[in-house]
Image: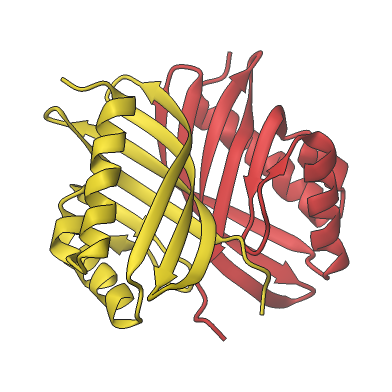
Chain colours: A yellow, B red
Amino acid sequence: MAGAQEGISATNQQFMQGFAGGDAEAIARCYTAEAQLFPAHSDVVSGTAAITAFWQGAFSLGYTGARLETAEIEEHGDTAIEYGTYLLSAGHAKADRGKYVVIWKNDGGTWKLHRDIWNTSQPAE
Amino acid sequence: MAGAQEGISATNQQFMQGFAGGDAEAIARCYTAEAQLFPAHSDVVSGTAAITAFWQGAFSLGYTGARLETAEIEEHGDTAIEYGTYLLSAGHAKADRGKYVVIWKNDGGTWKLHRDIWNTSQPAE
């Protein structure tokens, strides 16, 4: 069984690859079956189908890349808490930068995102 | 030593009372000494002085009340993860509603906010 650090890094790689490929289903597979997203300007997004649709929506807005950078991981048994920063791109432009907190669960040996909240660090328009 | 549920509820009460009284220092005392806020449109806010200044800034924007509602608490020893929703008011108006994730630490018997991230659930303007 992979340690949290290693397992989270592997899943984040999958997430970024899925994002680069515009593959919302691949991204949704990085989440637990009971996962929830907490996006800004939205109510809570719960479960695989809604999470897939959410990321599909991001692609239709023109996002083409996500870079996730882990700042810190706290491990608590089968749960881990990750703090990090993200950079979203749209074509060659930087579209957004911000920070996130992800609650991870060890799901049968694979670390998956269970709760995912983020917000922009860019100034309000 | 208070259980996480009870301790978090007590600190959230203090937070809301501090908010209603416009008392940023009382709010800052709800956080650990190494706490960090992750507000939207801002970089990470670290430590007691910066956290006090942040909430002071919220009062100068006209916010007069915060209602925090816990949806779920996960306890992991001296750490707990809280998911919840907030309602901010400004005078008698509802100014904002959203959701939050707080990582709590048992700090010598008192549960204190350690990492605090939230975002609005209102539609983008």
Q: Is residue A14 left or right of residue B62?
A: left
Q: Nearer the viewer, residue B102 or A58?
A: A58
Residue B25 sits in quarter: top right
Is the C terminus of chain A in the top left, top right, bottom left or bottom right quadrant?
A: bottom right
Residue A75 sits in quarter: top left
Residue A76 sits in quarter: top left
Residue extending furthest bottom?
B125
Residue B59: image location, x then y, percent: 84, 62
Q: Is residue A83 left or right of residue A125?
A: left
Is the N terminus of chain A in the top left, top right, bottom left or bottom right quadrant?
A: top left
**Residue positioned 72% across, 35% down in the render:** B30
Q: Nearer the viewer, residue A105 or B98?
A: A105
Residue extending furthest front?
A92
Q: Nearer the viewer, residue A62 or A50?
A: A62
**Residue positioned 44% across, 53% down in the render:** A117
What number of labels is visible?
A: 0
Residue B61: image location, x then y, percent: 83, 69
**Residue positioned 65% across, 64% down in the render:** B41
Q: Is residue B28 above or below residue B91?
A: above
Q: Nearer the viewer, residue B70 or B55?
A: B55
Residue B62: image location, x then y, percent: 83, 70
Residue B68: image location, x then y, percent: 59, 53
Q: Is residue A47 above or below residue A85?
A: below
**Residue positioned 21% across, 69% down in the render:** A22
Q: Is residue A119 left or right of residue B90?
A: left
One can see residue A57 in this view? yes
Q: Is residue B64 above or below residue A74?
A: below
One can see residue A47 in this view? no
